[in-house]
Image: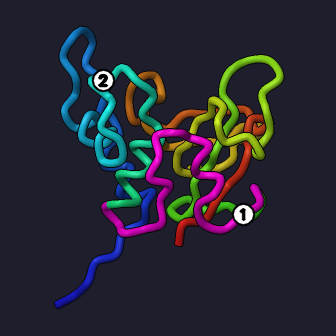
Amino acid sequence: MRKVEVSAFELAQRFVGIKEVPGSVSNQHILAMLRLDDQWPADDAVPWCSAFANYIAWLLRLPRSRSLRARSWLGVGEVVSPDHAEPGFDVVILKRGKGNQPGPDVINASGHVGFFAGIEGHRVLVLGGNQSNSVSIAPFPGSQILGIRRLA
């Protein structure tokens, strides 16, 4: 029997377009991702980027943070520099918000996490969940990068 291998990025691409349901109804797929690692989310209107990354890693039996905090991914896998990041293997952890955000040594702060999709000028492309309330590829300023980690 032939074993088919798929990267985290390739698997995550299959979820592009999944989005939150407006109003009091939740997308049950997103809710399942959230509840993989924590039971408190009652709906899909909470930050779920880390839940998406954890779900993909869980499906592929890769190391994962097991936390809904985006910055928890700073402790997963091996450190990779932006020059050596590769789609399919790496997650990007970003600062979130405006103003002076804490650096990578502060895990208990806002952030964003997703799968590295490339570099475009001074921006990093991220395939992630909860990007405009859906799974998508979106650009972020390279200056927001807190870290890049290789999962496998």
Residue 52 vertical position relative to residue 150 in the rendered view, above or below: above
What is the CA distance from the residue labelled 1 to the residue labelled 2? 31 Å
Q: Residues within 10 Å of mark 1 (few under 14, many from 20)?
A: some
Q: Is residue 146 left or right of residue 87?
A: right
Residue 35 occupies which quadrant of the picture?
top left
Amino acid type for the residue under numbered disc 2: Glu
Q: Is residue 88 left or right of residue 46?
A: right
Q: Nearer the viewer, residue 89 or 33?
A: 33
Residue 101 vertical position relative to residue 137 in the rendered view, above or below: above
Question: What's the residue at 50%, 62% (across, down)?
Answer: 88
* Stretch of the chain drawn in magenta: 59-82
Instruction: First in sequence, mark 1 or 2: give its number.
Output: 2
Q: Nearer the viewer, residue 17 or 98?
A: 98
Question: What's the residue at 62%, 34% (across, down)?
Answer: 111
Q: Residues within 10 Å of mark 2 (few under 14, many from 20)?
A: many
Residue 57 occupies which quadrant of the picture?
bottom left
Q: Is residue 114 left or right of residue 147?
A: left
Amino acid type for the residue under numbered disc 1: Val
SS for tag 1? loop
Q: Is residue 127 left or right of residue 95?
A: left
Is 105 covered by the magenta stretch? no
Residue at which label 1 appears: 80
Q: Residue 64 location in percent, x, y?
A: 47, 59
Q: Residue 33 location in percent, x, y?
A: 30, 42
**Which quarter of the rendered picture does the N terminus lie within?**
bottom left
Residue at which label 2 appears: 20
